[in-house]
Amino acid sequence: MPTILRLNGFRFYFYSHEPDEPPHIHVDRGDATIKVWLGSFEVAKSRGFRAHEIGGIVDMVTDHQTLFLERWHEYLAKVTDANMNDERVLDVRFDAHSLIVDLNDGRSISAPLAWYPRLAKATDEQRAHWEKCGGGYGIHWPDVDEDLSTEGLLRGAPAAKAA
Protein backbone atom coordinates (compact mmCIF):
# COMPACT_ATOMS: atom_id res chain seq x y z
CA MET A 1 0.00 0.00 0.00
CA PRO A 2 1.87 3.03 -1.24
CA THR A 3 2.00 6.04 1.08
CA ILE A 4 1.33 9.17 -0.95
CA LEU A 5 1.61 11.86 1.71
CA ARG A 6 2.19 12.36 5.43
CA LEU A 7 0.73 15.57 6.77
CA ASN A 8 -0.11 16.76 10.30
CA GLY A 9 0.11 13.23 11.71
CA PHE A 10 -2.07 11.74 8.97
CA ARG A 11 -0.96 9.11 6.46
CA PHE A 12 -2.60 9.25 3.02
CA TYR A 13 -2.37 6.04 0.98
CA PHE A 14 -4.21 3.56 -1.21
CA TYR A 15 -4.26 -0.22 -1.39
CA SER A 16 -2.79 -1.77 -4.50
CA HIS A 17 -5.53 -4.41 -4.65
CA GLU A 18 -8.42 -1.96 -5.24
CA PRO A 19 -7.99 -0.97 -8.91
CA ASP A 20 -11.61 -1.77 -9.79
CA GLU A 21 -12.96 0.92 -7.47
CA PRO A 22 -13.20 4.59 -8.41
CA PRO A 23 -10.19 6.69 -7.33
CA HIS A 24 -10.11 7.17 -3.57
CA ILE A 25 -7.66 7.73 -0.75
CA HIS A 26 -7.35 6.09 2.66
CA VAL A 27 -6.30 8.29 5.57
CA ASP A 28 -5.08 6.95 8.91
CA ARG A 29 -4.00 8.48 12.19
CA GLY A 30 -3.39 6.06 15.03
CA ASP A 31 -6.19 3.50 15.02
CA ALA A 32 -8.61 5.78 13.17
CA THR A 33 -9.17 5.40 9.43
CA ILE A 34 -11.28 6.99 6.72
CA LYS A 35 -11.79 6.38 2.99
CA VAL A 36 -12.66 9.35 0.75
CA TRP A 37 -13.71 9.27 -2.93
CA LEU A 38 -11.48 11.59 -4.95
CA GLY A 39 -14.20 12.59 -7.42
CA SER A 40 -16.98 13.65 -5.07
CA PHE A 41 -15.03 13.97 -1.79
CA GLU A 42 -17.70 11.88 -0.12
CA VAL A 43 -16.68 9.71 2.80
CA ALA A 44 -16.99 6.06 1.80
CA LYS A 45 -16.34 4.81 5.33
CA SER A 46 -14.87 6.07 8.55
CA ARG A 47 -13.90 4.48 11.83
CA GLY A 48 -12.49 6.24 14.87
CA PHE A 49 -12.51 9.84 13.70
CA ARG A 50 -14.81 12.34 15.38
CA ALA A 51 -17.30 14.27 13.27
CA HIS A 52 -15.37 17.54 13.57
CA GLU A 53 -12.15 15.82 12.39
CA ILE A 54 -13.77 14.39 9.26
CA GLY A 55 -14.40 17.84 7.73
CA GLY A 56 -10.74 18.77 8.18
CA ILE A 57 -9.60 15.51 6.61
CA VAL A 58 -11.89 16.02 3.61
CA ASP A 59 -10.46 19.54 3.26
CA MET A 60 -6.91 18.10 3.16
CA VAL A 61 -8.00 15.55 0.56
CA THR A 62 -9.58 18.33 -1.51
CA ASP A 63 -6.39 20.42 -1.27
CA HIS A 64 -4.26 17.50 -2.50
CA GLN A 65 -6.70 15.93 -4.97
CA THR A 66 -4.45 16.51 -7.98
CA LEU A 67 -1.50 14.76 -6.34
CA PHE A 68 -3.65 11.82 -5.21
CA LEU A 69 -5.23 11.37 -8.64
CA GLU A 70 -1.85 11.52 -10.38
CA ARG A 71 -0.42 8.89 -8.06
CA TRP A 72 -3.56 6.74 -8.34
CA HIS A 73 -3.29 6.63 -12.12
CA GLU A 74 0.50 6.26 -12.19
CA TYR A 75 0.49 3.28 -9.89
CA LEU A 76 -2.83 1.52 -10.28
CA ALA A 77 -3.22 2.08 -14.01
CA LYS A 78 0.12 0.35 -14.58
CA VAL A 79 -0.93 -2.57 -12.41
CA THR A 80 -4.30 -2.87 -14.16
CA ASP A 81 -2.73 -2.60 -17.61
CA ALA A 82 -0.40 -5.49 -16.78
CA ASN A 83 -3.30 -7.96 -17.04
CA MET A 84 -4.36 -7.63 -13.43
CA ASN A 85 -7.55 -9.59 -12.82
CA ASP A 86 -7.24 -11.43 -16.13
CA GLU A 87 -8.72 -14.64 -14.81
CA ARG A 88 -8.53 -16.49 -18.12
CA VAL A 89 -6.75 -19.83 -18.26
CA LEU A 90 -3.13 -19.83 -19.37
CA ASP A 91 -2.18 -23.44 -18.56
CA VAL A 92 -3.38 -26.50 -16.66
CA ARG A 93 -1.20 -29.04 -14.89
CA PHE A 94 -1.40 -31.69 -12.22
CA ASP A 95 0.79 -33.08 -9.49
CA ALA A 96 0.11 -36.24 -7.50
CA HIS A 97 -2.69 -34.67 -5.44
CA SER A 98 -3.62 -31.34 -7.03
CA LEU A 99 -5.09 -29.62 -10.04
CA ILE A 100 -3.11 -26.45 -10.78
CA VAL A 101 -4.46 -23.77 -13.10
CA ASP A 102 -2.22 -20.88 -14.16
CA LEU A 103 -4.03 -17.65 -15.02
CA ASN A 104 -3.06 -14.91 -17.47
CA ASP A 105 -2.55 -12.45 -14.60
CA GLY A 106 0.25 -14.54 -13.08
CA ARG A 107 -1.72 -16.27 -10.34
CA SER A 108 -1.93 -20.03 -9.95
CA ILE A 109 -4.91 -21.78 -8.40
CA SER A 110 -4.31 -25.11 -6.72
CA ALA A 111 -7.17 -27.38 -5.65
CA PRO A 112 -7.24 -30.94 -4.33
CA LEU A 113 -7.67 -33.40 -7.17
CA ALA A 114 -10.06 -35.35 -4.91
CA TRP A 115 -12.57 -32.47 -5.30
CA TYR A 116 -13.02 -33.46 -8.96
CA PRO A 117 -13.74 -37.22 -9.06
CA ARG A 118 -13.80 -37.46 -12.87
CA LEU A 119 -10.33 -35.94 -13.06
CA ALA A 120 -9.08 -37.99 -10.11
CA LYS A 121 -10.12 -41.20 -11.90
CA ALA A 122 -8.81 -40.08 -15.31
CA THR A 123 -5.53 -41.23 -16.81
CA ASP A 124 -2.63 -38.82 -17.21
CA GLU A 125 -3.34 -38.78 -20.94
CA GLN A 126 -7.00 -37.88 -20.39
CA ARG A 127 -6.04 -35.09 -17.96
CA ALA A 128 -3.52 -33.71 -20.44
CA HIS A 129 -6.23 -33.47 -23.12
CA TRP A 130 -7.99 -30.27 -22.05
CA GLU A 131 -9.21 -27.21 -23.92
CA LYS A 132 -10.20 -23.70 -23.04
CA CYS A 133 -13.88 -22.83 -23.23
CA GLY A 134 -16.16 -19.99 -22.19
CA GLY A 135 -13.94 -17.29 -23.66
CA GLY A 136 -10.92 -18.64 -21.78
CA TYR A 137 -12.62 -18.60 -18.37
CA GLY A 138 -13.39 -22.31 -18.46
CA ILE A 139 -11.62 -25.62 -18.94
CA HIS A 140 -13.13 -28.65 -20.67
CA TRP A 141 -11.79 -32.20 -20.60
CA PRO A 142 -13.61 -33.93 -23.48
CA ASP A 143 -12.38 -37.44 -22.62
CA VAL A 144 -13.97 -37.37 -19.16
CA ASP A 145 -16.74 -34.80 -19.79
CA GLU A 146 -15.56 -32.44 -17.02
CA ASP A 147 -15.93 -28.66 -17.10
CA LEU A 148 -14.53 -26.17 -14.57
CA SER A 149 -14.53 -22.39 -14.46
CA THR A 150 -11.85 -20.11 -13.07
CA GLU A 151 -14.61 -18.39 -11.08
CA GLY A 152 -15.46 -21.64 -9.31
CA LEU A 153 -11.80 -22.49 -8.76
CA LEU A 154 -11.13 -19.07 -7.26
CA ARG A 155 -14.12 -19.52 -4.93
CA GLY A 156 -12.76 -22.92 -3.90
CA ALA A 157 -15.84 -24.76 -5.12
CA PRO A 158 -15.48 -28.54 -5.44
CA ALA A 159 -17.42 -30.44 -8.11
CA ALA A 160 -21.14 -30.82 -7.46
CA LYS A 161 -22.15 -34.11 -5.90
CA ALA A 162 -23.74 -36.53 -8.36
CA ALA A 163 -27.45 -36.98 -7.82
Image: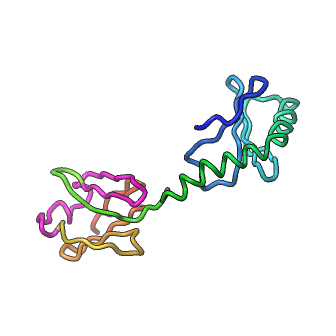
For the question of whether residue 2 can be seen, the reply is yes
Q: Is residue 45 left or right of residue 103?
A: right
Residue 94 x, y percent position in the rendering: 20, 56
The image quarter in which residue 133 lies: bottom left
Q: Which quadrant is the N terminus positioned in? A: top right
Residue 71 x, y percent position in the rendering: 67, 45
At 12% from the left edge and 63% from the top edge, which residue is drawn?
124
How are the colours assigned in the image?
rainbow
Verify whether residue 43 appears in magenta: no
At 72% from the left edge and 49% from the top edge, which residue is drawn?
69
Q: Which residues are magenta?
A: 99-126
At 83% from the left edge and 36% from the top edge, which residue is drawn?
60
Which residue is nearer to you in this view: 118 or 100?
100
Q: Is residue 161 left or right of residue 50?
A: left
The image quarter in which residue 129 lies: bottom left
For the question of whether residue 33 can be seen, the reply is no
The image quarter in which residue 51 lies: top right
Which residue is nearer to you in this view: 159 or 13?
13
Verify whether residue 101 appears in magenta: yes
At 60% from the left edge and 42% from the top edge, which residue is drawn?
15
> Is 134 located above or below residue 58 in the figure?
below
Residue 100 x, y percent position in the rendering: 28, 55
> Is 67 located above or below residue 126 in the figure?
above
Q: Which quadrant is the C terminus positioned in? A: bottom left
Residue 154 x, y percent position in the rendering: 41, 55
Q: How many marks?
A: 0
> Is 88 located above or below residue 131 in the figure?
above
